[in-house]
Amino acid sequence: MARFIQLHALTVYAPSNLNRDDTGRPKTARFGGVERLRISSQALKRAIRTSDGFKERLKQHRGTRTQRLGETIQQHLVAKGHTPEAALEIARRIAEVFGKLKDPKDANPAQIEQLAFISPEEQAQAIALADQAASGKKLPEKKDELVEALLRKTDTAVDIAMFGRMLADNPEFNREAAVQIAHAITTHKVDVEDDFYTAVDDLKRSAEDAGAGFIGELGFGSGVFYTYACIDRGLLESNLGGNAALAGEAIAALIEGLATASPGGKQASFASRARASYLRAEQGSQQPRSLAAAFFKPVRGEDLFALSVAALDKTASDMTKAYGACFDGEPRVMNVAAGTGTLHDVIAFARS
């Protein structure tokens, strides 16, 4: 069975602001000497793991990324009749396994300082330990014993297995990511534009001034985005405790999300619900490689999508000529504009 599954997607986005920088403008990057629109890897991963398809396929096999495990435990115990003070003490003891706690005098003393990725098994065990402690059974006194009782090195949390996690205080329970997703960039040069907009007060009378109740400015851009992802199938199965069937469903969920899910930035303003117009999957045990070099020279012309497909296919062919086979057999391709291939075909190929 091939070790790596490589995915190359081209997605056309109309004017939008999918992923903002600290000033509220669309994220960008310079590549090949020109500015491109960019969607961060983090934004893409979140869009995938929170998409309807991902949730439906994986249901109970998804982790939770949160600071609020302690609050969940505290609320659980209070609901069962325990005092808030006693519940908080137990919650803090358990939550600190996942990271540094906020100060006891903080407004949210049960919260963890950092976001922690927690598997369903770990959350269930945390609640079980809390119930035991509340009923009079003492928690392990040594922190390392509590860590061993609570944390898992393998579980069924597909998103943790895919995207990894880091627990600074307990690195032996870190998870190496089995999926790599690059920042998406436009295949061509893009100039970020500005939308000057106004809002009108519905209750303003005609006798008053005709000015707007609010004015604002919003950056946006559009283009053809290239996204590259690589799945280490062996590591994914290992992270999932050897569960090959679950790993297969995880691969399907990832590909569906990559092709159909969009980052949520400014969706109400732009309705930027796009799907990949081109998707290419490859399998092999050879060293993976991105095809971003296809777009180092920015694509120019009237049909940016068709030209992007041609540039990507040519670079893939040139790499094979230079290095030998970069994957096994033939790739499986869906090209919406050409009417060839389907998402179902690509998923079935990648799972095989």
Image (cartoon, grey):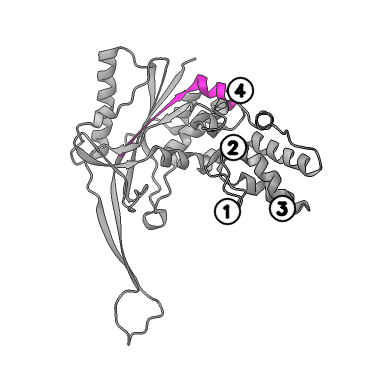
Q: Distance between the Cα atoms at labels 1 and 4? A: 39 Å
Amino acid type for the residue under numbered disc 3: Glu
Q: Is residue 127 left or right of residue 330?
A: right
- Between 164 and 104, the one nearer to me in the picture: 104
Q: Residue at x 47, y 38 (%)?
A: 257
Q: Please, which residue is most extreme toward the top here? A: 324
Q: Are marks 1 and 2 in contact (CB under 8 Å)?
A: no
Amino acid type for the residue under numbered disc 2: Phe
Give whichever of discs 1 and 2 has the lower sequence position: 2
Q: Distance between the Cα atoms at labels 1 and 2? A: 18 Å
Q: Residue at x 23, y 34 (%)?
A: 307
Q: Distance between the Cα atoms at labels 3 and 2? A: 21 Å
Residue range corresponding to the magenta coloring: 225-246
Q: Please, which residue is most extreme toward the bottom here? A: 207
Give whichever of discs 3 and 2 has the lower sequence position: 3
Q: Residue at x 37, y 47 (%)?
A: 19
Amino acid type for the residue under numbered disc 4: Gly
Secondary element at image label 4: loop
Q: Is residue 187 left or right of residue 149?
A: left
Q: Position of residue 32 (x, y in %)?
A: 20, 33
Report the residue marked by disc 4: 241
Looking at the rendered structure, the number of numbered marks drawn on it comes to 4
